[in-house]
Image (spheres, rainbow, N blue to C red):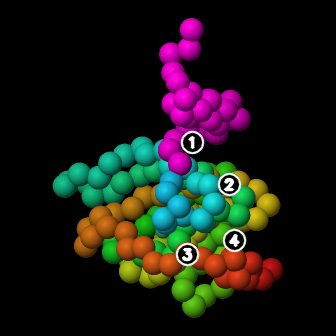
């Protein structure tokens, strides 16, 4: 007899599929479409506390999915652990990020990140909460997303 039911079973299946594929972290919980376009999942690894104010989580983006525009009052570090992703700061071109890359998002700079159109992207994000939590803005439009230039 199965020990789970409904959405819990679905989550357990997607988590074990991720591990079977040799990926380091589970897929976790689906992220809300109020701050993400398309399907993205968060596996929360570390919560911040008063002594160490960094939170750490693994985010899996399906092809084409991405965050809304946002900024981090204490900045953010992105470690690309699988696939090919996009990263863009407001007013700058889209940068492509590959497995093994590390990106430092400066504090209070509006930006977004997510998968490229052709494949999944997995990142570990390390986010400080000194000076406040993430500030969310509008969605990244298809026009903005498709404006990647080689
Ligand atoms: Mn960010």
Q: Which of the labelled discs sits on residue 96, or is there none?
A: 4
Label 1 vs label 4, nearer the camera: 1
Q: Earlier in the sequence, mark 3 or mark 1?
A: 1
Taking the image as shown, residue 118 lies to the left or right of residue 49, namely: right
**Residues packed near mark 3 inside 10 Å, few (<14), some (14 to 19) or many (20 plus):** some
Residue at image position (80%, 80%) is: 150
Q: Which of the labelled discs sits on residue 139, or is there none?
A: 3
Label 2 vs label 3, nearer the camera: 3
User: Where does the image place residue 58, in percent across and percent down from the top left?
Assistant: 51, 49
**Secondary element type, mark 4:** strand
Rounded to the nearest angstrom, the CA distance separating label 2 from label 3 is 16 Å
**Secondary element type, mark 3:** loop
User: Where does the image place residue 5, in percent across and percent down from the top left?
Assistant: 52, 24
Rounded to the nearest angstrom, the CA distance separating label 3 from label 4 is 19 Å
Taking depth in this image into account, of 148 and 8 the one nearest to the observer is 8
Q: Which residue is mark 1?
A: 27
Query: Which residue, as the protein is rendered here, is positioned at the far top?
Result: 1
Q: Earlier in the sequence, mark 2 or mark 1?
A: 1
Q: Is residue 130 magenta?
A: no
**Looking at the picture, does residue 73 appear above or below residue 126?**
below
Q: Earlier in the sequence, mark 2 or mark 3?
A: 2
Residue at image position (51%, 21%) is: 4
Quadrant of the frame with the N terminus = top right
Query: Which residue, as the protein is rendered here, is positioned at the far left?
Result: 50
Residue at image position (52%, 41%) is: 28
Q: Earlier in the sequence, mark 2 or mark 4?
A: 2
Q: Which residue is mark 2?
A: 62
Rounded to the nearest angstrom, the CA distance separating label 2 from label 1 is 11 Å
Taking depth in this image into account, of 70 and 9 the one nearest to the observer is 9
- Whether residue 54 can be seen here: yes
The part of the chain drawn in magenta is 1-30
Would you identify the image quadrant in which residue 87 lies?
bottom right
């Amino acid at each position: 007899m199965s020990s789970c039911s409904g959405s819990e079973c679905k989550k357990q299946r997607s988590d074990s599929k991720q591990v079977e594929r040799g990926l380091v972290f589970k897929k976790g919980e689906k992220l809300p479409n109020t701050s993400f376009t398309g399907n993205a999942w968060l596996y929360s690894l570390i919560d911040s506390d008063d002594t160490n104010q960094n939170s750490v989580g693994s985010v899996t983006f399906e092809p084409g999915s991405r965050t809304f525009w946002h900024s981090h009052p204490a900045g953010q570090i992105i470690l690309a652990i699988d696939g090919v992703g996009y990263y863009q700061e407001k007013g700058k071109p889209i940068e492509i990020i590959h497995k093994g890359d590390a990106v430092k998002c400066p504090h209070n700079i509006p930006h977004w990140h997510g998968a490229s159109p052709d494949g999944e992207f997995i990142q570990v994000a390390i986010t400080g909460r000194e000076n406040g939590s993430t500030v969310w803005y509008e969605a990244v439009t298809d026009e903005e997303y498709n404006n990647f230039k080689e």
